[in-house]
Amino acid sequence: MTEVFENYNIKNESSFRIGGTVKKAAFPSNSHEFIELLDSNEYDMILGNCSNVLFYSGKINKNIIFTKKHNSYRIEDNKIKVSSGTLGALLSKECLKNNLSGFEFLIGFPGSFGGMIYMNASAHNQSISDCFISAKVYDLKAKETKLFSKEDMHFNYRYSELQKGSYIVLEADFELNKSDYETIKTTMDKNTEFRKTKQPSLKYGNAGSIFKNPPNDSAGRLLDLCGFKGQKQGGAMVFENHANFIINYDNANSNDVISLMYKMYSKVQESYKIELRPEIKYIGNKETEEYKLWELMATENIQMTQK
């Protein structure tokens, strides 16, 4: 049965560990419950594991569906069917047990499949689109389920067709490659070690890369050249080993993070005439000052999408 909570504190739903309360939070456990919530027209947004989300620290005037309890999967030979709320790191470990290669890159990902398909998550020369077969999605406008093939998704860097329409992932099918246990494990261990040395531990709240890489360049390189490593704003700090990460090192709030982001954005624009665009998603209220700063940095409006 769907769990629904009023005035729900969402701080611990985000890997940033920042956030206030939302009017209503619902947690469906299967596709039937999920579709019922979508058809109710009560909800403004659908979120997964919130690994690339920054919530406003005050009261957020939204009703949100969280998919983390919609987390079943089935492995048959080299085929996998997975629900949208399933964690990538969890399924990566299950693939190792079954000698399946293709999801090694997910071992360090805190996100869930709905959001990873939406953004075509990738790392270490692997991406969600590599093994993707199809996805069952719900069309919010037509009020019906549809099946999207790999061709229908038009996958590209950090892009899928889901970003153009009103489509919500319910479940997806993948086909992985058979391999041997030690080969898969060696790759996963390398990926894990890379993340330990280049990216912050979740001991400190963070939401992954803060800005998208501009064409033919690296956001981290530009921010490093601008001297941002170790810079602080309130309880937020730019990670000392990679300038495109912000960590919550001392009870940061959303204003700390956005103020620091705006300094980073402005300096790169001033120094290199390049406008960095946020990779993380911000969820707040339009009347606040920090939302206005966010809109100066971002080109897309917050809408009912799956993150």
Image (cartoon, rainbow, N blue to C red):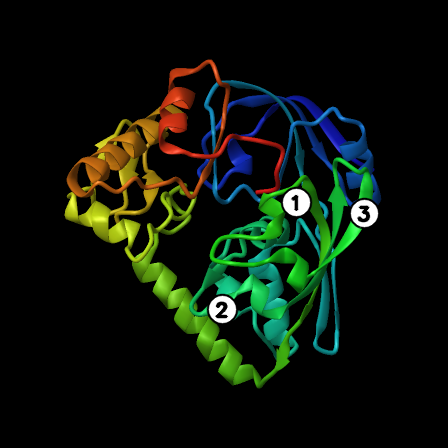
The three-letter code of the residue at mark 2 reads Gln
Counting residues from the start of the chain, the first of labels 2 and 3 encountered is 2
Q: Is residue 43 above or below residue 174?
A: above
Counting residues from the start of the chain, the first of labels 2 and 1 encountered is 1
The three-letter code of the residue at mark 3 reads Thr
Q: Name the residue beneath numbered marker 3.
A: 145
Q: Position of residue 102 (x, y in %)?
A: 57, 72
* Quadrant where the image shows the N terminus: top right
Q: Position of residue 113 (x, y in %)?
A: 62, 54
The three-letter code of the residue at mark 1 reads Lys
- How far, Cα to Cα, is label 2 from label 1? 24 Å
Q: Is residue 211 left or right of residue 237?
A: right
Q: Name the residue beneath numbered marker 2.
A: 126
Q: How many marks?
A: 3
* Quadrant where the image shows the C terminus: top right
- Classify 10 Å Cα crowding around label 1: few (below 14), some (14-19), many (20 and above): many
Q: Name the residue beneath numbered marker 1.
A: 68
